[in-house]
Image: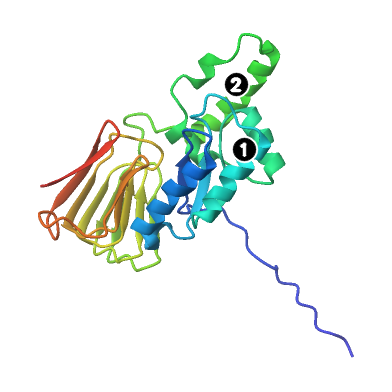
Amino acid sequence: MNAKVDTSDACDLRFGQVGIACVRVRRVDAAALCDELERRVRAAPQMFSRAAVVLDLSHLLNLPDDAAVNALLEAVRRAGMLPVGLAYGTSDTEALASRMGLPLIAKFRAAYEPAGAGAAAPASAEPARRSETAAREQQREPILSVPAPGSRQGAQHHAGSVRSGQQIYARDRDLIVTGAIANGAEVIADGNIHVYGSLRGRAMAGAQGDETARIYVSDFRAELVAIAGHYRVFEQIPDDLEGQSVQCWLEGEKLLLAKL
């Protein structure tokens, strides 16, 4: 009697857009980091409790040692979030991620790497090593850079509602939604977002770091809006904005909202 053998694949493996937050560390202080993240979780538990986060160390003057990074990762966990990787940085960051047993998440490089970071390399660094590092970074750049003006494709249209738990992502283009966006749903675009309906979920424009992107909503009741990583969470919509036609934009690092 012959046993039946299942020859189908055990799984499918695909790369896609996922909602991952980025924690930019400004000083190596695990206790302060835990306190700040706990405050964020308490303010918006539906948004941040058990949220997947990437630790970005690129704004520190010096890369912390392994013990300090382990303490920062543990602080994220104690706050109620889940660290899933390190943000792309230098070759030293890549080596650190390998020692920590964490992936290096490259999508955050364009949005968070300081301008001119490569120009401040120590004079004692070997020219060959700098050239090799620059070459590797240049190979990744086309995927991660903000699209040049005029290079975006035509807008992506989504007709109808976006259900809770659903995510729509417009890569390298604007996004137009002609329906309601439910609580727990996300719409993301590398360009602008236009919502011709009620926004009760989350809208994130300029996802690859374009600070000129804007969000336009016909009926504003959002959980969260974000542009180029700068966000505002709403536990309660301000009375003058609830149900109104609203636009969102950045001025410096401040996310502003106003009625249309």
Badge count: 2
154, above or below 245, in the image = above
Q: Foreground: 159 or 181?
A: 181
Dot label at residue 134: 2
The percent position of residue 161, horizontal first and vertical second, equals 28, 66
Which residue is depicted at the point 45% across and 53% down? 19
Q: Quadrant of residue 66?
A: top right
Dot label at residue 225: none
Pointer 2 with pointer 1, Cβ within 8 A: no
Amino acid type assigned to the residue bearing label 1 in the image: Ala
Mark 2 element type:
helix
Amino acid type assigned to the residue bearing label 2 in the image: Ala
Is any atom of residue 75 visible in this view? yes
Residue most extreme to the bottom = 1
- Dot 2 or dot 1, earlier in sequence: 1
Mark 1 element type:
helix
Query: Is 206 left, or right, of 114 in this rendering?
Result: left
Query: Is 145 left, or right, of 127 in this rendering?
Result: left
The percent position of residue 128, horizontal first and vertical second, equals 70, 14
Q: Foreground: 159 or 26?
A: 26
Instruction: Name the residue that disc number 1 marks.
Output: 68
The percent position of residue 159, horizontal first and vertical second, equals 28, 62
Q: Quadrant of residue 235?
A: bottom left
Cα distance, mark 2 to mark 1? 27 Å
